Amino acid sequence: MPDNIYLPQLARVAYIKEEVVGERSIKTFRVEPVDGKLFDHECGQCAMLSIFGRGESMISIASSPLIREYKQFSIMRVGRVSSAFHELEVGDVIGIRGPYGNSFPVDDWRGKNLYFIGGGCGLAPIWPVITTAVAQRANFKNITVFYGGRTSRDIMYRTELEKLRESVDVHLSIDKAEEGWNGYCGFVPAAVMDKDPIPDNAIAITCGPPIMIKFVIQNLNNLGFKDEQIYTTIENKMKCGIGKCGRCNVGKDYVCVKGPVYSWAVLKNLPAEY
Amino acid sequence: MEKILDKKQIDGWVAALTANSPDEWEVHTPALEEGIWTYQPANGTVRLDHPNTKQSPKEFAFPQREIFFSFEQIKGEAPRLTQIMPKEQRHAVFGVRPCDGRGVPRMDKVFNDHVEDKYYTSRRKNIAYVGLACNKPPSPNCFCLSVGGSPVSTDGLDVQMTDLGDRYFVKAITETGKAMMAAGGKIFADPSAADQKQVKQTHADAVAYPQRKINDPDGAPAKLKASFNSPLWEEMARACIGCGICTFLCPTCHCFDINDEVHNKAPLSGQRVRTWDNCQFPDFTMHSSGHNPRENTGARLRQRVNHKFQYFHENFGTHQCTGCGRCVSECPVGIDIVTVVNKVTEHAG
Amino acid sequence: MINIQDIRDTARDMLAKGEVRAVIGYRRGTRGMLAEPAFITDPEQASELVWDPTCFHNLSLYLVEDRKFLTHIRKTANAPIAVVAKGCDARSIVVLLQEHYFKREDVYIIGVSCEGTGVVDERKLAPLLNGVQATDAAFDGDDFVFTTAAGEKRLPAREVMADRCLECRIPYPKEHNVVHGEDKTGRQLAEPFAALTRFEAQSAGERWDAWSRHFDRCMRCFACRSVCPMCYCEECVVDSITFPVTPATSAEEKANRIRWIERSATRSENITYLMTRAMHLAGRCTDCGECERACPVNVPIRMLNNKMEREAREKYGYEPGASIGGPSLVASFLDSDPGDFIR
């Protein structure tokens, strides 16, 4: 951690991709340090990104910790600061500070079957776990990715997901049938049930809209997954990112410190205030 | 170090601290302005006959507005950030009541936990709190005894003064306190046996004075946890208007916001600034998506009460509330944390 | 002299008959003598209602809250809501009706007259009680009677009444469904705008110094705005905090939200906040005085509103909340409106 926890490091935007265009637009950014190195991070951690004059946003780091050259973020355009991000061009310099929060205990999952279940922009926070697991493929048994968008237009990391099929099972879905769509049609929790994942020696990692997470967990429980086998990452409005501004707490935990990664066994005992 | 200070000599002590070269103190004492007691720079006669100040002394280490850094950016170039740390200046705050004194280590915990907040700590290390014991409760809504405090607590203070009528019994609590008293030199006299007896009696009387009471402070964390979904929260928050009085006046409330204040658009220049924020404002936890985990006054009242009597206790082993009673006295619509905690815990489980 | 039992009976009967769905009134709080707002839905609870010199709250605020809540849950009420209203409070309701915030049939006004007195100003009372706390306050003709541990303390009401009550000429809710107490319209214990006139006797330099100290002390807790029934805007122009975001709010709207002032409680920002609020209340403020009472650092906010109300009276002969059928000052234009200040 740097000496002054609130002072960002400068980072240059090296790459911008329009993942989802139009409504619910998402852009992927890769940033490189202006001077020196960027901090190291672990899967699940986040960073505060600054656009000076507009503000800061806490965004999940979407790239694997194994990648040293840049850090990747996928940001949906929802409000004041995210709109400013969508106006950035390659070469622009922003601020970055981190890493914040806890991480997925990936090392504990060696030798297990991994099920990743993402919806909408929720693929980004679990993407580092997916890519790290794939990079260390031999450490894990079966890896399966379930991912759904509202429409086919809302599916992010399209190219990367297709490439993933080489080493993992990928099941894409959209909410309602579309011409030319051959995959599953229906909500993500149902898409998961459709493939009947087995809880034996398995870990399920899910992230997406709150309503999706709720039903995914319900379905997993019904399939026999224990609460300790289910992991998710939650979000709350954040400002400081270091457990001091008092805003993001869920019960006694500041999500920016004790979260955002939680096993359902722990999360279900916290007040439903997120 | 225990001394006696004649009340007529207190101005002399303050003057000695102010002139204490090379480490001059900026001394702040309670003063009455527009009918309210606030901390003001010491100016002539020092008064310590205040009940309690309207605002707590948290503003010294945690001001309403703190500039983090300035930023400048010419289009096409990288922005330039200039860190702005608080000025190195020692501050002595006089007349700090024990409840406010206990608030200090609680704020210290928050701003040092997990990572250090340099803006807070750089101010904090330069502040000395000179406390004044409460011979009787300054407010009808005091309840320090219920939350592990006491009218004669020295927790968080560097010096403790006790009013003995025409003089103060002055006791150093920390090394800094000792040094401050040493700066006063011969202004202080040694206490006699009678003085010691009187202090003991004054303190005993102070603690025996009746106060408002939290009925089950030790059971509160578990009972509040069990009452998360109680309909009492909405009922007790029905009158709440969602202002910032309870939190801004509280010695241990520390919520803040961070915003960029732009002074010039092109070339861009401005400052990133921290300001006090408040969990009772409706938009405090509002996500950009429009989802608000705390949508009504009941949820927000529950957050404040739980933070004070459950969450802080679960994290640090002690209640965050120090029983100063300001939120009770100043709420424009009568929301009373003592009544709220008692009622909710009474109905728990 | 008002008999509290009459008010309780009215509330109980209306609730028992289902003619109103709730009664907003006053009941004893948990802090000594002070009353607090009560929200009664059960006829049995009507016995909790009180009427004493500490009933200073403008309960029409909760009509606004109620309306916002109904809108939020997308329901219409099946019966009107009753509210206990003093003269000033009833005038607030009239302003809300003029602005079509709700309909007349949505509210049942249980009017109470302040008769010859009004509400107590705690700041005036404190020095007269010599540090002793009062556990009860009661009306008694032209006096207030306070009960303390050291015995009863009787004080002429004039000595401890709020300034706004002293200056009030209509201590009676003209708009009402039922009213308790005598109509003492025309009674006046001080000149209108007396406090303002006293302040304005100072030089411009003195006034600026005084106000600078007030602006510096303001901590932007927004109590003044939160307690005011007229400040019902979901999106407050001078406050970047309140912005009604729903899932339907577009990113553009959020991105383009103008921040007129910063959150810093510095002099410039506080001036802009307080002055803008006063301008937005021009012709709408009924001088309930809650803003000033609620302010924890004694900023004389009422004076700012009074200044605008005096302008309204002198220039347009306008008094806010006089009658439902009357025009809203800032929302109407007459050819006869003075225009000499337009240059």
Image: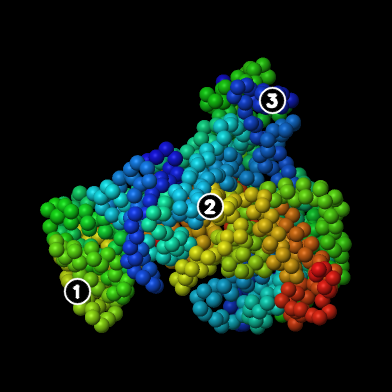
Tell whether B274 sits left or right of A93.
right
Q: Residue A29, percent across and down?
A: 35, 58
The numbered mark at residue C197 is none
Amino acid of disc 3: Ala
The numbered mark at residue B268 is 2
Which mark's residue is nearer the viewer, 2 or 1?
A: 2
Residue at 37%, 43% in the rendered image:
A35
The residue marked by circle 2 belongs to what chain?
B
Picture quarter with the N terminus of chain C: bottom right
Amino acid of disc 1: Asp
Q: Are marks 1 and 3 in contact (CB under 8 Å)?
A: no
Near mark 3 (Cα within 10 A), the count class, few <14, some 14-19 or many ≥20, is some
Q: Quadrant of residue C288?
A: bottom right
The residue marked by circle 3 belongs to what chain?
B
Q: Residue B331, percent across and down?
A: 62, 55
Q: Residue A89, percent across and down?
A: 40, 59
Q: Quadrant of residue A264?
A: bottom left
Q: What secondary structure is marked by label 1?
A: helix
Q: Nearer the viewer, residue B299 or B64?
A: B64
Q: Is residue B85 above or below residue B329?
A: above
Marks 2 and 1 belong to one chain:
no
Amino acid of disc 2: Leu
Q: CA distance from mark 2 to mark 1?
A: 54 Å
Q: CA distance from mark 2 to mark 3?
A: 45 Å
- Label located before the other in sequence (2 or 3): 3
Q: Which residue is mark 1?
A: A194
Q: Quadrant of residue C260?
A: bottom right
Residue at 67%, 16% in the rendered image:
B186
Q: What secondary structure is marked by label 3?
A: helix
Name of the residue lying farthest toward the front: B76
